[in-house]
Amino acid sequence: MSNNYQNLKKSDPAIHKLVLGEVKRQKDFLTLIASENYASPAVLEALGSPLNNKYSEGYPGKRYYPGNEIVDQIENLACERARKLFGADHANVQALSGGPANLAIYAALLKPGDKIMGAKLAHGGHLSHGHKVNFSGQLYQQVGYELDANGRLDMKKLAALAKKEKPKLIVAGFSAYSRDIDWAAFRKIADSVKAYLLADISHTASLVATKQLNSPVKYADVIMFTTHKSFWGPRGAVILCKKELAETIDRAIFPGFQGGPHDNAIAAIAVALKEASTPKFKTYTKQVITNARVLAAELTKLDYKIISGGTDNHLMVVDLTNKNLTGKEAEIKLAKQGILVSRSTIPNDPRGPFNPSGIRLGAYAVTTRGFKPADMKKLAKRIDAILKK
Ligand SMILES: Cc1ncc(COP(=O)(O)O)c(C=O)c1O
């Protein structure tokens, strides 16, 4: 973040000042927001490159505009790196972000009115998994599943729900679930009702890619992940799928949903995926998990209730009901002291999502900044001291 944006300063001093303000804010605050991370300098350079200027509707070798010889090579490289990193048959790197990618996947595989079985929002799901305020819940019917009383997935209950509701697609994917996933069990449930299985690993993709968590690649029909949470990547998404679905998925993204792909973002995705294949990155993802575990353990010692009792990945949801604090109150108190966490619903939350009963904490961003277990221990104590005041 050493760029001082001289051209921007000259042409738009107001925005220049705000950009520098945001750079400073990002330095000054510690972010435990589980969906945030820092793009690497190389990723930011690719994003800010003149690739932004190109139009390239279509796919490599089949564009609707001339002049795409270089862009084709970039998109091919990004796809090749994604396939290789995950061992997948096919990759599409054009989706603009995770929400639109999920909608395009549904459009590719379902008819309006079909049932999507996805985790309810308060049980770790995402809006785009069929919630009623999202088009995924308006165009399709959500069959929502829940975590059990221990805050874990109960695969037997999920199997029974699938049998009763016969969804056309099952989403195995979460914004706020701290345990590893039994992908084979999800596959078995999907097969029992002839449903597609979508693995939305937006929160855990880098941990999967570096073999810290189970991989859905053998089991899911389609896998989607965002590139800005778990990697040092740009905002964007990658869709992986089996050969048989490649054409259907590609056509859903373009021409189904989008026009011209963001070639600068695709180049930046390629850069992030290359970074992710290095030993340095594997060390990073191991550290992320260690740091998250230390934070969960320390908070538990300080009498915080972690949903499911701990974490296998980078995040945890903390139930604050025993602390006489709401999620929003905790979020505000911590932000005033320079620590950013996001309020979060807890399973069966008696409160609404605007002022829910918990907070969600993640270790990606602080680990990118170099935090080690000793720092996480200090952080837990600091969080406790702030929340107690
Ligand atoms: C599991 C999951 N899927 C999809 C999304 C949506 O991604 P985006 O915000 O890039 O649209 C998110 C974002 O938080 C997510 O957590």
Image (cartoon, rainbow, N blue to C red):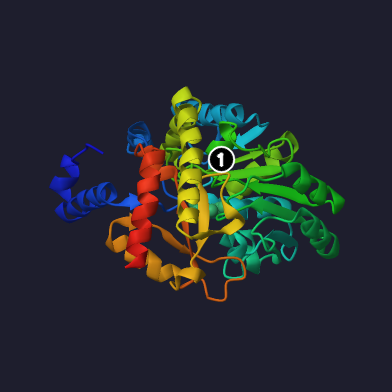
- 140 relative position to 327: left or right: right
Q: Residues within 10 Å of mark 1 (few under 14, many from 20)?
A: many
Q: Of 149 and 73, which appears nearest the observer?
A: 149
Farthest top residue?
Answer: 279
Residue kind at label 1, given as amino acid type: Ala
Instruction: Evaluate whether residue 54 shows in this view.
Output: no
Residue located 29% across and 49% down the image = 26
SS assignment at label 1: helix
Instruction: Evaluate whether residue 84 shows in this view.
Output: yes
Q: Quadrant of residue 55?
A: top left
Whether residue 141 is situated above or below residue 107 in the rendered picture: below
On the image, the x and y values in percent for residue 291 come to 45, 41
Whether residue 337 is situated above or below residue 61 in the rendered picture: below
Q: Of 247 and 106, which appears nearest the observer?
A: 106
Q: Quadrant of the N terminus?
A: top left
Whether residue 321 is situated above or below residue 360 in the rendered picture: below
Whether residue 205 is situated above or below residue 331 in the rendered picture: above
Which residue is disc 1 drawn over? 205
On the image, the x and y values in percent for residue 357 come to 50, 70
Residue located 45% across and 33% down the image = 284
Residue located 68% across and 51% down the image = 172
- 240 relative position to 316: left or right: right
Q: Of 356 and 251, which appears nearest the observer?
A: 356
Residue located 38% across and 35% down the image = 43
Q: Quadrant of the C terminus?
A: bottom left
- 171 relative position to 158: left or right: left
Q: Quadrant of residue 268?
A: top left
On the image, the x and y values in percent for residue 136 come to 63, 62
On the image, the x and y values in percent for residue 10 come to 13, 46
Q: Quadrant of residue 265?
A: top left
